[in-house]
Amino acid sequence: MSTLQIRVIENKDRTVISIHQEKLLNSEQRADMQKYWGNVITNIAEKLTKPCDRVL
């Protein structure tokens, strides 16, 4: 079982999202998780840069 850390860090007028995963089985699993989390970050970035079409 791996350990996952996700941090959201304020940095002046920006925000940094840091993802760290430990205790993965091997380099193949590390590559798979790097691709997976890369896609997650890309998805988050796309959603944050789109104009909001809903009124809260």
Image (cartoon, grey):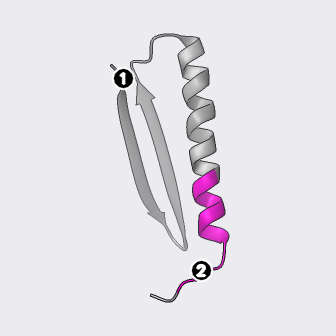
- For mark 2, what is the residue? 52
Q: Is residue 49 above or below residue 29?
A: below
Q: Is residue 50 left or right of residue 56?
A: right
Query: Farthest residue in the front direction?
Result: 54
For mark 1, give the secondary structure.
loop
* Residue located at (36% from left, 23% from top): 2
N-terminal label among 2 and 1: 1
Instruction: Looking at the picture, tell me which residue is in the foreground, 39 or 11.
Output: 39
Query: Farthest residue in the bottom direction?
Result: 55
Q: Looking at the picture, which amino acid does disc 1 mark?
A: Ser
Q: Position of residue 54 (x, y in %)?
A: 54, 84
Query: Is residue 51 magenta-colored?
Result: yes
Residue stretch rendered in magenta on the structure: 43-54
Q: Position of residue 43 (x, y in %)?
A: 62, 53
Mark nearest the camera among 2 and 1 is: 2
Q: Is residue 40 above or below residue 54?
A: above
